[in-house]
Image (cartoon, grey):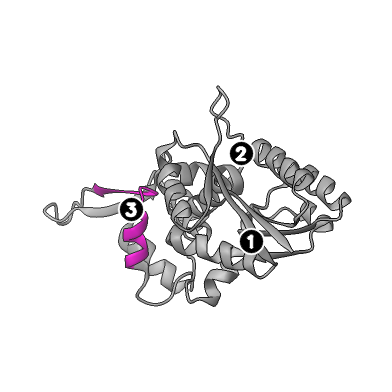
Amino acid sequence: MGVAILVDLANIHLGLKFNYLNPPPYERLAQIINDYGATQGDIRIRKVYTDWNDGRLERIARQFASAGFRAEQVTRKASGRDRTDICLSLDALELFYSEDDLDTLVLAAGDADYVEVMQRLRSKGKRLFVITLEKNFASELLPYLTGHAIIEKELTSIGYDLIDYSPLLKFLYNLQQFHHSKTGGFVAASLYMRKLEEYNIVTQNTAKSLLSQMIENNVIAKYTVENPSTPEHPTSAIKLNESSEVVKNFIRNYLD
């Protein structure tokens, strides 16, 4: 069985960036996708689709290229909108209609934009698989699939557990709302860490390291508040960094 692996890099990258504090090394992710494809047959084609003019994605694409994936340029629309789903879908149709030895597609993406191409390939008797992030997986794809794999589970199986941003950001958001309702109060960093552990949102003694990572990733902003009782020791306070893409995505998806 001839297999083509096609990777929507922006879909995978943004899913990891917006949802997880600790994305895996991309060389490891490329190997996971490659290994999954190899279980479905003889890999004939490996392609990763990205905009090489986007510096954030270009470095990651090179890591996929080092793992044997051919990088395909995707030019964005004038508005800046990503066109990967269109380019990848057209390429998939051309490949599977012209290459008689290809009968299996492994798509590294999981959004509903790929329903139409899956419908067409399934009508031609092709075997269809996706490997995707659980948070990106659209149920609309299921009727057309021969099988699928979830990246988070694949990572867990090799001992790499992702840390979900959602409960960490929701908890800080709720603390902010509560304290701001009380005459514009603030959230002390020490309070946030203590409450994370008290409510079993994180394991014991990990709150400090997670907070440090979120500050380093510019997801949480740290500032100081005057302490009237001991002016020489101001209080360290924190808040969601609303200029962060991660926080904007969180607010858009979970709070609106």
Magenta stretch encompasses residue 222: yes
For badge 1, the amino acid type reads Ile
Number of on-image labels: 3
Q: Nearer the viewer, mark 3 or mark 1?
A: 1
Indicate the secondary structure of the residue bearing disc 3.
helix
* Residue 194 in picture, x, y percent from top left: 37, 69
Asked if one can make out residue 23 in the rendered structure from this viewpoint, the answer is: no
Furthest toward the front, the residue is: 100
Q: Nearer the viewer, mark 1 or mark 2?
A: 1
- Picture layout, residue 80 above or below residue 51: above
In front here: 144 or 39? 39
Q: Quadrant of residue 57?
A: top left
Neighbour tally class for label 2: few under 14, some 14-19, many 20 plus, Cα within 10 Å: many
Left or right: residue 209 versus residue 90 is left
In front here: 206 or 9? 9
Indicate the secondary structure of the residue bearing disc 2.
helix
Could you say which disc has been placed on residue 84 in the image?
Answer: 2
Give the extent of the magenta segment.
208-224
Q: Which residue is mark 3?
A: 215
* Residue 242 in picture, x, y percent from top left: 43, 40
Could you say which disc has been placed on residue 43 in the image?
Answer: 1
In front here: 250 or 120? 120
Q: Are marks 3 and 2 in contact (CB under 8 Å)?
A: no
